């Protein structure tokens, strides 16, 4: 009888551990399972952190910006839909103001938010010029 009790306790502990491991794994992946109005389940991904690179503008050729990051140089591809903002000092804090692609100059520090990259080429969604 003691062997049977020990076996059941061990089995229960294993089930609890596996369930906890599964729940933490689902949380870590950001997969949320919800129900809509019709009691149908929907899988949703939690919002991702923005993808960005930070560096100093080394060259501008047409709509392509070259950004130096340490010893590496990244190629930033832009198009007419690019959003450009400038972060400026406003008293004790900073604020973002509208800017244009022509405001980007060599030697400026910038943050490039991108949606895809291939090696050292990045397709930019937004460029933030850092003026401080």
Image (cartoon, rainbow, N blue to C red):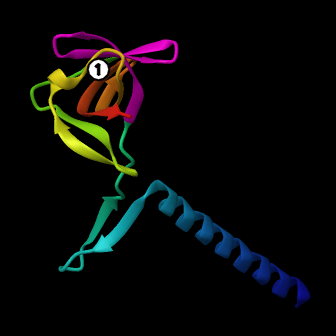
Q: In this view, does 26 lie above or below 54?
A: below
Q: Quadrant of the N terminus?
A: bottom right
Q: Is residue 2 above or below residue 38?
A: below
Residue 114 in picture, x, y percent from top left: 30, 33
For disc 1, the neighbor class at 10 Å (few under 14, some 14 to 19, many from 20) is: many
- What segment is highlighted magenta in the picture? 52-74
**In the image shown, does 13 or 131 lie closer to the viewer?**
131
Residue 18 in picture, x, y percent from top left: 63, 67
Q: In this view, does 83 lie above or below 108?
A: below
**Magenta segment: does it hold 58?**
yes
**In the image shown, does 129 or 20 lie closer to the viewer?**
129
Residue receiving disc 1: 76
Q: Residue at x 49, y 61 (%)?
A: 26
**Magenta segment: does it hold 113?**
no
**Residue positioned most to the bottom:** 1
Residue 57 located left or right of residue 78 = right
Q: At numbered mark 1, what does the secondary structure look like: helix, strand or loop?
A: strand
Q: In which quarter of the image is the C terminus?
A: top left
Q: Which residue is drawn at 21% across and 43% down?
A: 97
**Quadrant of residue 11 in the image?**
bottom right
Residue 118 located left or right of residue 15 = left
**Majority secondary structure of the magenta segment?**
strand
Residue 83 in picture, x, y percent from top left: 17, 35
Residue 100 located left or right of residue 35 = left
Q: Is residue 44 above or below residue 125?
A: below
């Amino acid at each position: 009888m003691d062997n049977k009790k020990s076996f059941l306790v061990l089995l229960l502990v294993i089930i609890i551990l596996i369930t906890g491991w599964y729940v933490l794994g689902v949380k870590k992946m950001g997969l949320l399972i919800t129900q809509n109005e019709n009691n149908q389940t929907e899988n949703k991904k939690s919002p991702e952190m923005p993808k960005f690179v930070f560096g100093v503008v080394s060259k501008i050729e047409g709509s392509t910006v070259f950004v130096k990051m340490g010893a590496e140089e990244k190629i930033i591809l832009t198009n007419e839909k690019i959003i450009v903002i400038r972060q400026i000092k406003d008293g004790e804090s900073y604020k973002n103001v509208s800017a244009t692609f022509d405001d980007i100059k060599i030697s400026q520090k910038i943050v490039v938010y991108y949606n895809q990259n291939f090696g050292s080429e990045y397709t930019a969604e937004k460029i933030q010029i850092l003026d401080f």
